Amino acid sequence: MRIEDALARAQEAAAPEVGRGRLAEYIPSLAAVDPDQFGMAIASCDGQVHVIGDADVPFSVQSITKVFTLALVVAAEGEDIWRRVGREPSGNPFNSFLQLDQEGGRPRNPFINAGALVVTDRLQSLTGDASGALRDLVRRESGRADVSCDPEVASSELEAGHRTLALAHLLASYDNLENPVDEVIGQYVEQCALSMTCRELALTGLFLARDGVLSDGTQLLSARQTKRINAVMLTCGTYDSAGEFAYRVGLPAKSGVGGGILAVIPDRGVACVWSPTLGATGSSAAGLAALDAFTTYSDWTVF
Amino acid sequence: MRIEDALARAQEAAAPEVGRGRLAEYIPSLAAVDPDQFGMAIASCDGQVHVIGDADVPFSVQSITKVFTLALVVAAEGEDIWRRVGREPSGNPFNSFLQLDQEGGRPRNPFINAGALVVTDRLQSLTGDASGALRDLVRRESGRADVSCDPEVASSELEAGHRTLALAHLLASYDNLENPVDEVIGQYVEQCALSMTCRELALTGLFLARDGVLSDGTQLLSARQTKRINAVMLTCGTYDSAGEFAYRVGLPAKSGVGGGILAVIPDRGVACVWSPTLGATGSSAAGLAALDAFTTYSDWTVF
Amino acid sequence: MRIEDALARAQEAAAPEVGRGRLAEYIPSLAAVDPDQFGMAIASCDGQVHVIGDADVPFSVQSITKVFTLALVVAAEGEDIWRRVGREPSGNPFNSFLQLDQEGGRPRNPFINAGALVVTDRLQSLTGDASGALRDLVRRESGRADVSCDPEVASSELEAGHRTLALAHLLASYDNLENPVDEVIGQYVEQCALSMTCRELALTGLFLARDGVLSDGTQLLSARQTKRINAVMLTCGTYDSAGEFAYRVGLPAKSGVGGGILAVIPDRGVACVWSPTLGATGSSAAGLAALDAFTTYSDWTVF
Amino acid sequence: MRIEDALARAQEAAAPEVGRGRLAEYIPSLAAVDPDQFGMAIASCDGQVHVIGDADVPFSVQSITKVFTLALVVAAEGEDIWRRVGREPSGNPFNSFLQLDQEGGRPRNPFINAGALVVTDRLQSLTGDASGALRDLVRRESGRADVSCDPEVASSELEAGHRTLALAHLLASYDNLENPVDEVIGQYVEQCALSMTCRELALTGLFLARDGVLSDGTQLLSARQTKRINAVMLTCGTYDSAGEFAYRVGLPAKSGVGGGILAVIPDRGVACVWSPTLGATGSSAAGLAALDAFTTYSDWTVF
């Protein structure tokens, strides 16, 4: 089936879920988003983009940035980061503090919050400006030079951030932060608060489907590194529903509480879907339904 | 690279690991196996088989059968089994009883022991002879009509089986077994004790790489069902090292404490590797190294 | 205040709770008990007994026997049992399997089910007839020669006993049972199913308030051993509400799902209260209220 | 046996343990203490004090202050604090974050660090100066007007305090702190850093043995409130070894990582023992041995 048609089917499949579920409540400006939006973009490896719905409406990228931050760290220094963070699924949401504490302050994987704090911390050490490095990457790849952080979201997150602070201090108590807690938190929050569209995110993620090659033809990651990041996304990218997500969608993917999901189809392209309300698993329910349908109709799948 | 050459590279890469680590100790007849063996077989979707090393030496299949049992249940009645068993990684080995108890007696996934007991129980209800149904499948697909259970292994397992009995009774306390505990345990142990070679296992698993089509051209599973079982294997097939395994090998796979690993490369074929000693994660260390090298050199990978 | 008056106040305080809450449901014959009963007996160290309400109605003793079984084991061989069972509170109900598994098959304390299985197993090894030894003790001390096990309760428990079987097999997997699982379970269930009255239980427990001296003046336990068993009762005797119980009642006590509670006031006497319905913590809510009031009015307390 | 003699026996019993074990390492000024010290003081309800060894050497009181802080809060507003903190043993050290997180930010009891933060927070709200209120109490009762905080210890603790900060932020994320995290931490650390002698601590704690009556005859707590605090000390006062401590010593007690232990013998008096090295359970090993012997020889015990 043609991509345009698979996209239309995906939108149909998602329709009953759009607006159902809850908005991320702990961040006031996310809780104020119109819940009835839905957008999806497919960027092919050849650079073509197909979109449907609200694919050009900016939303809060949140945890999807964790993939890009990880890619930047691996690009800068290879595999060293794995000494400080694991790559196993976490199993249970309530385990986050328990596991961190029992496993000597080494987060389970780079996509849970504790792990992303460690990755951000490392990127900060490597670049002196983690958020700037991330911004450079997304601006260059998305083609929009003014992608930036939503200051209202960032300041909401800082205020509501006791849980993130608790994780950061627990990491620090195990000497698994190189920079001061406040600096790491500041960088982390700024990254999460990036505001981007489905189209922009799909374009930005394209290197993950192209063995690490950026839009200008340079190599951000080796093919092997890229494959490995995709593998970690598949097993750990959607929190405690990684198994469910793999079962239904079968693609490496990273979701965010803003309602976005980025999914990689190696050698084919990247899908980005967005709808603000979240299902029980903390990912966009409409997005999950759309990706499930899209992979079924397009046969863009890894299994 | 040609498959023969990739196999040779895989054997080279595995060589330093062969004989290192520990044998499964709790079963006397497994602990008595010569640790310095290594075999590997690749069955292509076209039915060709390439082998290297001890690929025709029978070994104890153990948990690898869990994939086939699951396939038989899904083939018989579709998705109903998921009401009784989840499909999320378990996160931590010590969690098996905790999670089962906290999650109302519904095992995390069909590949941990508790989950496999539920799947076996269901197959027993559906067929009246779970082990017989499994034996029929492996005999037909492997082409060896006398594949059977090693009675010494089975009786060792029964004797050492207090932990499995504890899981079964905990399942029963949550009404998640349809058949008597002893009957389910008997069937379960008989399945685990199957004795097969790499070549035979690779041939048996080929339907997982061929969208569910058996060697005689009939459809055991639909393409969608097959894809889903592969997805569950990737996220849950190698116990608590599913993330690590995906990172290094990037293929749906199921390992057993006998030292075998079965890996699926959709639309390409199936790899089966065997070497009896186990690494820290409970899977064959040499097998993991061999698969890592094989996917790198052959480019048979899903990511 | 005189004991008679304190008893009357205790009954008043308990009245609003009598019949509220739930009966133990998993044992049919316990679920069939008239929920509106309440009895209490106080046995003083001098042998006098004061009673109120249904203090002469027999009920299912259940876990209260765990104290007597422990006393018999300590009497027979001193402190050896503590190598196989701890004496720390368990913290959380859902932890029973987790802790047992993480702590190498050594139960947290002798009053959780896993611990009582180990104590019963040891008594069986020491006597060849654990239930008989217990029966001898309770008959002798209570003064009723025909105290015995309710066969209907025992057989109900055996049928519903998957959870207990799971614990026993987990203990066996760690080599922490000396006798076959079925034999230990049989003895354990027979003990729990003893049927006794408040008066009889108070008389039986009196040695715990008299530094270990039995009704015939012989010494079952040394003063030091008795003090220690009382200490373990105070920290571990009422499951996950030991802290709450100590806070409100301030006495060493052991409760059972039959609705009975035995409390020890060292050098003063023993209280036994019974009312069949259980509060959220699994102990008799009316019994807790009665003991709270009794200690307040009588000033029989340890703190 | 006379108290002087029981004290001498206690010192003898403790001698082999003095200097064994480890000093609290995470606070440099505690790690620098001479490990071979031992002191003990007994304050009787009549106001007499008996001492032995280094009973007049000041040491870092640490967690022992948690009892006094709790007493001040209960004195000020009764039982309200129990809405924000429980009174059950915590079961396991590694559970501190898990339990706090699973139980909605309500610490298990007032003597684990998370609970003490909540109690300090409340005292801060009630008094505007939690540390000042505590200082007033200990100065008045100990009879030394210049008891104060060791600034070096306090600043060491602040620096090493990531774990405490993590707990405080996790509490804040559940809205279980009324004051800013930094203010609560500041007060908390200042309290822990109090420097006092065995003699002074025994005198300060005497109200716990005298039904709440202070040295000047005024009532800080009611008899019932005092009994209840003692009960919580017995079940929760010595971290994860409350059961072991009750078994061996049989008294309500609170230990600190400075090596001090305060134990209450209701209606008799208060014992304070100090020796800087800690056993496996985090309490002074020599102190535990001394109290074990003292209760045995003096028969000052609650059971």
Image (cartoon, coloured by chain):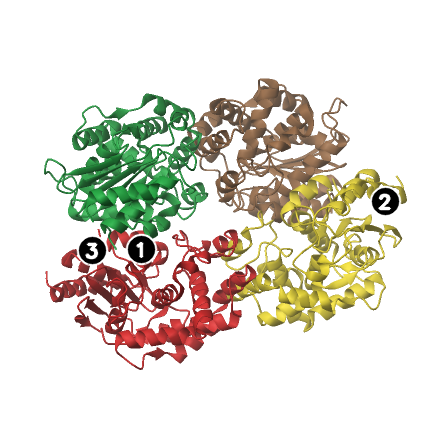
Chain colours: A yellow, B brown, C green, D red
**Does dot 1 land on a helix, a strand or a loop?**
helix
- Mark 2 and mark 3 in contact? Answer it, CB < 8 Å: no
Q: Earlier in the sequence, mark 1 or mark 3?
A: 1
- Mark 2 and mark 1 in contact? Answer it, CB < 8 Å: no
Q: Is residue C170 left or right of residue B4?
A: left
Nearest the eye: B277 or D242: D242
Quadrant in which residue A199 is drawn: bottom right
Task: Kindly identify which residue carries mark 2.
Answer: A7
Nearest the eye: C78 or D292: D292
Q: CA distance from mark 1 to mark 3?
A: 14 Å
Q: Which mark is residue D231?
A: 1
Q: Please provide percent x and percent y for residue B265.
A: 72, 39
Q: What chain letter is assigned to the residue under label 1?
A: D
Quadrant in which residue D227 is drawn: bottom left
Neighbor class of circle 2 (other Cα within 10 Å; few <14, some 14-19, many 20+) is many
Q: Quadrant of the N terminus of chain A?
A: top right
Neighbor class of circle 1 (other Cα within 10 Å; few <14, some 14-19, many 20+) is many
Q: Could you tell me if residue A300 is visible in this image?
A: no
Question: What residue sits 25% from the left and 50% below the top?
Answer: C297
Question: What residue sits 59% from the left and 29% below the top?
Answer: B119
Q: Please provide percent x and percent y for residue D284.
A: 29, 63
Q: What chain letter is assigned to the residue under label 2?
A: A
Q: Which mark is residue D301?
A: 3
Question: What residue sits 28% from the left and 44% below the top?
Answer: C9
